[in-house]
C-alpha cells in the first residue's frame, strides 16, 4: 500500500529486522502465551536488548534518540505479527514512557527510564477505576501528604500490563476540595511498594495474552520523589499525552484491518465452491473492494496525522476522529472477513476468528467511540 510518511532507508532497515525478529522469535510462541495469559517477561527483555523498546528515548537514558517513525514501525510490526494482544508493548514504549520523559526530573528519569528501555521493567498507566472510566474527573483514588511522602488509597481496574508491571503511572486526587482539573496528580508506584497489590489476570473475551488487572492501593506510602511533575497538574498531563496515545492505537487498528483483509483475500483465492474460486464471485469482489476502499481512507488519514504529530502540531480533533473511525472500520472489516470465510471463520484455528474477537476492544480502550465523538463535537463549538 502506498504510504505518504517519509520513511527513509534507516526506517526500512529497522522494520525489516524487527519483522524478521518477531517472525522467528515471537510468532512461534503465541499459542503458549495465550495459555499463560501474557507475553512472558523474558520476551520484554529480548525486545529491549535488541533496541526495539522506546527507541525515541535519549541516549543518556539508554535509548537511540530516534524519531517518532521508529515508534510507528514498532507499533505496526507488533500489530502485524503479534496482533492486538501485544498492545502492551506500544503502551509501554509510546504511551507510558512519555509521561516519565516529559514530566520526570533528571533524577527520576535516570532512576526509571534505562530499565524500561532495556525491558527489565514493564510499564503501565492506571487511570480507570470501577466507578470512573470515560469520566476521568470522577476518579476517587487519593494521595494525602504525610511526613516526607504521600499515602495512596484507591482501586484501579482494566490495567494493561497489570500483572507484570514494575512501574505504574497512577492518577489520583491530591486535593478533593478543588475542581478535579486542579486536584489531580500523577505518581509512579513501584511494584514492591507496601500497600500496593494487583489482582490476577482479568478474564476477557479477547486479546488472550495481554494481561489486564485490577490494582489496589491501601495506605500505600510513596516518597515525595515518586510524584511526577507538579502536584495538581495530573489532569493536564493526561490530556497532553492522549493525542499520542490515541494516534498509536489508531496506527495499530489500521494495520490490523490491513492484515485481516490480506489474509482474507488469500483465503478467497484458495477456497473453491460451485466449481470456482470464492474470489471470482461478484459479492466477494464487491465486499473486498468496499473494504479496500475503507482501508485506503483510513491509511490516508493515519499517515497524514503521523506526519502532523511529528511536526508537533495540535491535532486532537483529527486524532479523535481517526481513533473512532479507524477502530470502527476495523470491526466492520473483521466482521465482513469472517463472513467471507464461512463456517471456517468461526473456528478458532483460523486467524480471522481470533482477529474478530480481538478487534472488539479497540473501540473501547483509550477512550470509547462515544467519548471521541464528544471531544470532536466540543472542539467544534457544540
Ligand atoms: C482490555 C482493556 C484494557 C484497558 N487498559 C487500560 C489501561 O491500561 N489503563 C487505564 O487506565 N484504563 C484502561 N482501560 C479502560 C478503558 O480506557 C475504559 O474501559 C474506557 O475508557 C471506558 O470506560 P468504562 O469501561 O468505565 O465505561 P463507561 O465510562 O462506564 O462507559 C459506558 C458507556 O457509556 C458511553 N459513554 C461515555 N461517555 C458518554 C457520553 N458523554 N455520552 C454518551 N455515552 C457515553 C461509553 O462510550 C460506553 O459505551 C482498558 C480497558 C480494556 C477493556
Image (tube, helix red, strand yellow):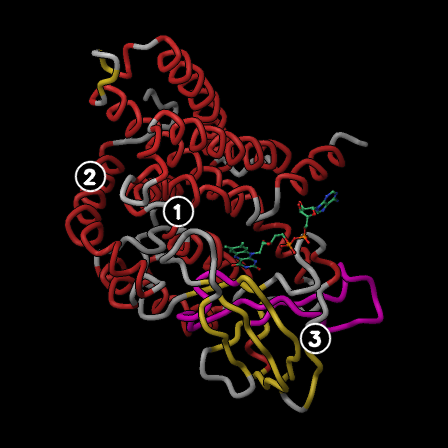
Residue 222 percent location from the top left of the image: 57, 83
Residue stretch rendered in magenta on the structure: 159-187
Distance from label 2 to label 1 (Cα)?
20 Å
Task: Pick out the residue farthest to the bottom.
Answer: 147
Q: Which residue is mark 2?
A: 16
Distance from label 1 to label 3 (Cα)?
32 Å
Q: Residue at x 65, y 65 (%)?
A: 130
Q: Which residue is mark 1?
A: 84
Distance from label 2 to label 3 (Cα)?
46 Å
Above or below, 162 relative to 319: below
Which of the two discs, 1 and 3, labels the residue nearer the N terminus?
1
SS at mark 1 in the image: helix
SS at mark 3 in the image: strand
Specify whether 101 is left or right of 151. Answer: left
Residue 201 percent location from the top left of the image: 45, 68
Asked if the residue under mark 3 is in contact with the one under mark 1, i.e. CB atoms within 8 Å, the reply is no
Magenta stretch holds residue 61: no
Task: Pick out the residue farthest to the left.
Answer: 24
Residue 25 percent location from the top left of the image: 17, 54
Which of the two discs, 2 and 1, labels the residue nearer the N terminus?
2
Above or below, 76 relative to 43: above
Q: Which residue is mark 3?
A: 142
Q: Image quarter for residue 350?
A: top left
Residue 193 percent location from the top left of the image: 50, 84
Q: Residue at x 37, y 51 (%)?
A: 56
Q: Residues within 10 Å of mark 2 (few under 14, many from 20)?
A: few
> Closer to the observer: label 1 or label 3?
1
Front-lying residue, 115 or 163: 163
Specify whether 281 is left or right of 136. Answer: left
Which of the two discs, 2 and 3, labels the residue nearer the N terminus?
2
Q: Image quarter for residue 292?
A: top left
Amino acid at each position: 500500500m502506498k504510504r505518504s510518511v517519509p520513511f527513509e532507508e534507516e526506517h526500512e532497515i529497522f522494520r525489516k529486522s524487527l519483522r524478521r525478529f518477531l517472525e522467528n522469535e515471537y510468532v512461534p510462541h503465541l499459542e503458549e502465551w495465550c495459555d499463560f495469559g501474557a507475553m512472558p517477561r523474558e520476551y520484554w527483555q529480548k525486545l529491549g536488548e535488541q533496541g526495539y523498546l522506546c527507541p525515541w528515548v535519549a541516549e543518556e537514558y539508554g535509548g537511540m534518540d530516534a524519531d517518532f517513525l521508529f515508534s510507528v514501525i514498532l507499533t505496526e510490526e507488533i500489530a502485524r505479527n503479534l496482533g492486538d494482544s501485544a498492545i502492551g508493548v506500544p503502551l509501554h514504549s509510546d504511551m507510558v514512557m512519555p509521561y516519565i520523559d516529559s514530566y520526570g526530573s533528571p533524577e527520576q528519569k535516570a532512576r526509571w527510564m534505562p530499565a524500561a528501555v532495556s525491558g527489565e521493567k514493564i510499564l503501565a498507566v492506571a487511570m480507570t477505576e470501577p466507578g470512573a472510566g470515560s469520566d476521568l474527573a470522577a476518579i476517587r483514588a487519593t494521595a494525602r501528604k504525610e511526613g516526607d511522602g504521600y499515602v495512596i488509597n484507591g482501586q484501579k481496574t482494566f490495567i494493561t500490563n497489570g500483572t507484570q508491571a514494575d512501574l505504574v503511572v497512577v492518577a489520583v486526587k491530591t486535593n478533593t476540595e478543588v475542581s478535579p482539573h486542579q486536584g489531580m496528580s500523577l505518581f509512579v508506584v513501584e511494584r514492591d511498594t507496601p500497600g500496593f497489590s494487583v489482582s490476577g489476570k482479568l478474564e476477557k473475551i479477547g486479546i488472550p495474552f495481554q494481561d489486564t488487572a485490577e490494582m489496589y492501593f491501601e495506605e500505600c506510602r510513596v516518597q515525595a520523589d515518586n510524584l511526577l511533575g507538579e502536584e495538581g497538574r495530573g489532569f493536564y498531563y493526561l490530556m497532553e499525552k492522549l493525542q499520542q496515545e490515541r494516534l498509536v492505537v489508531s496506527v495499530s487498528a489500521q494495520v490490523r484491518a490491513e492484515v485481516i483483509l490480506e489474509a482474507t483475500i488469500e483465503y478467497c483465492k484458495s477456497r473453491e465452491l460451485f466449481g470456482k474460486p470464492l474470489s471470482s464471485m461478484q459479492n466477494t469482489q464487491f465486499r473486498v473492494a468496499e473494504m479496500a476502499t475503507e482501508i485506503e481512507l483510513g491509511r490516508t488519514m493515519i499517515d497524514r496525522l503521523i506526519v502532523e504529530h511529528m511536526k508537533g502540531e495540535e491535532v486532537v480533533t483529527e486524532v479523535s476522529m481517526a481513533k473512532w473511525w479507524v477502530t470502527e472500520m476495523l470491526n466492520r472489516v473483521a466482521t465482513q472477513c469472517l463472513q467471507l470465510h464461512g463456517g471456517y471463520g468461526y473456528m478458532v484455528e483460523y486467524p480471522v476468528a481470533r482477529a474478530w474477537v480481538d478487534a472488539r476492544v479497540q473501540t473501547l480502550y483509550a477512550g470509547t467511540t462515544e467519548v471521541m465523538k464528544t471531544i470532536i463535537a466540543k472542539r467544534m463549538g457544540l
